[in-house]
Image (cartoon, rainbow, N blue to C red):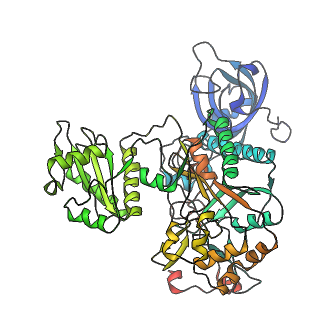
Amino acid sequence: MQFVKNVKRSHYCGELTNAQSGQEVILMGWADGRRDHGGLVFIDLRDREGLVQVVIDPNLETCKTAKNVRNEYVIALKGIVRTRPEGMHNKNLKTGEIEVEATHFEILSEAETPPFQVDDAKVQENLRLKYRYLDLRSLRQQKYLKLRHECMQLVRKTLSDSGFWEVETPILYKSTPEGARDYLVPSRVHPGNFYALPQSPQTLKQLLMISGFDKYFQIARCFRDEDLRADRQPEFTQIDLEMSFVDQDDVMALNEKLCRTIWKEFKGVDIGQIPVMAYDEAMNRFGSDRPDLRIPWELKDLNLELNNCGFKVFDDVIARGDCIKSLAVPGIGDYSRSQFDKLTAVAKQMGAKGLVWIKKGQDGSLQSPVSKFFTEDKLQRLFEFSGGSDGGAVLIVADTFQVTCSALGHLRSQLAQELNTIDTSCDKFLWVTDFPLLDFSPEEGRWVAVHHPFTAPQDEYLHILDKKEESNYSTIKAKAYDLVCNGNEIAGGSIRIHRQSVQQTIFQALGFNEEEVQRKFGFFNEALSYGTPPHGGIAWGVDRLVMILCGTDAIRDVIAFPKTTKAYDLMAESPGIVDREQLLELGIRLTNSAKE
């Protein structure tokens, strides 16, 4: 019997059930394990759909090679599906009620001893990434990538049914400032010139709106040369969409429907109506513009409570017009000085100058490094006002609004995770709106776009831009919105500028001169002059979305071939050097530092 060429697979291993009992099947896959029991050989056969136990009598002429099988051998077999005897069912296996009794058997490919067992989740990640093709054989990884595939198919169908057209945009494109470094690609036929890999299809999808396509979407590959972390990669995937003749509510409503469809399909729950919160409220209450609402703790504003308190550090902060906030954390009232010092170090990493704490033992006694500056009654009032409880502590930061909120917001997330107080039984969603349009960058000495230069300001702030009132630029709100789930931004977008005059004003506010505008955005600026509809859109982070749906905590788990946190591919050893001749052909010469 010649498998593959003449005999084709009839079923996947993991699809077999009692419904096929008595049927003849042809299976092909990898040996996940082999056991000799007397005269019989048992092999767990694995393919992308799961495992099934195969029983083989190697004394059969057609199955005599079964005794040679080792883990990860690729095998094919013909056999009869049998119901396992009562009491022999494997409840941990989807196919645990049946087994396949082989009648014909063939080894299609032998395998070296693998560096690890493919289903061992405890293998060091660097080893898994080096042998990613083996790691991807695990049922865990195949489940993740199957869900990713199914999610993208659902998105395509949902958007197509809503009148969207899928349009592909270029990967080799023009470098435009979008908040991160571009990956540059030198051009051989245009020496000294470079393409850029797109950080997003932003200007291109707006050009599609100008072209009259009305509703566009794309599962888009994007590239950003930035520092990495668990939920970032140098190349990533977006569900990118844009709509014409819409306002903010229209875009949010459509994407809320898409979110509800995804969660109903993959988690079997109705997420209900997603609440909406302004950026300022989110920062004030949670210290983050992507708050995790599964954590019950909120920040408290202490400026009024501490006004003229006599403690110079706090008095100076209030006199500058800055901010003092607190966070009550249950269960850390027994923390030692060194443990609070570690929390202080975290606050300093977020830009704060320090951290004040007040802790309360189960006996009701208060301790604080600033107790000598306050009466016991005052400390008690601060503790109670902040929401402190017996056996807990209150953490206080005094700095600028942004630093104070960010430091406490980071501590809120970190401590909730460490103390295991996050309610993981459900997912919590939030729309965050009314973001600042501009932020001043001390490093660059100019105003920069919080989202990107094409985000529309809210109408009531246009006069500030028209009059160039730079002192009020920080007050301008954008027509921008982010969709947050469990503390992760899973989608973000905005209504775009559709009037050329407003876009020109924004370019000026960002410090671009006419020559820069023409060089970087000339084609786009000209396109706006030919009749541009009001339009807006959003981009979903596919990797982050699927990470949440799969219940893992790193996007590397849901990407087929991810890179490390240093943007390195351990499997292919990429990036790597190229031949000198290739560089010369591109007109590139490496500096001594690059050669090292």
Q: In the rendered view, tell whether residue 21 sits above or below residue 556.
A: above
Q: In the rendered view, tell whether residue 591 sits above or below residue 451.
A: below
Q: Whole-percent x and y of residue 568?
A: 55, 64
User: Which of the 4 image quadrants contains residue 268?
Assistant: top right
**Viewed as shown, does residue 68 lie left or right of 399?**
right
Q: At x 66% / y 50%, what residue is drawn? A: 252
The residue lying toward the viewer, choosing from 424 and 5, is 424
The residue lying toward the viewer, choosing from 464 and 287, is 464
Q: In the rendered view, tell whether residue 299 sits above or below residue 575.
A: above
The residue lying toward the viewer, choosing from 87 and 410, is 410
The N terminus appears in which quarter of the rendering? top right
Q: At x 84% / y 42%, what residue is drawn? A: 5
Q: Whole-percent x and y of residue 313?
A: 24, 65
Q: In the rendered view, tell whether residue 122 sits above or below residue 246.
A: above
Q: At x 70% / y 55%, what residue is drawn? A: 247
The residue lying toward the viewer, choosing from 207 and 306, is 306
Tell me if I can see residue 466 in this picture: yes
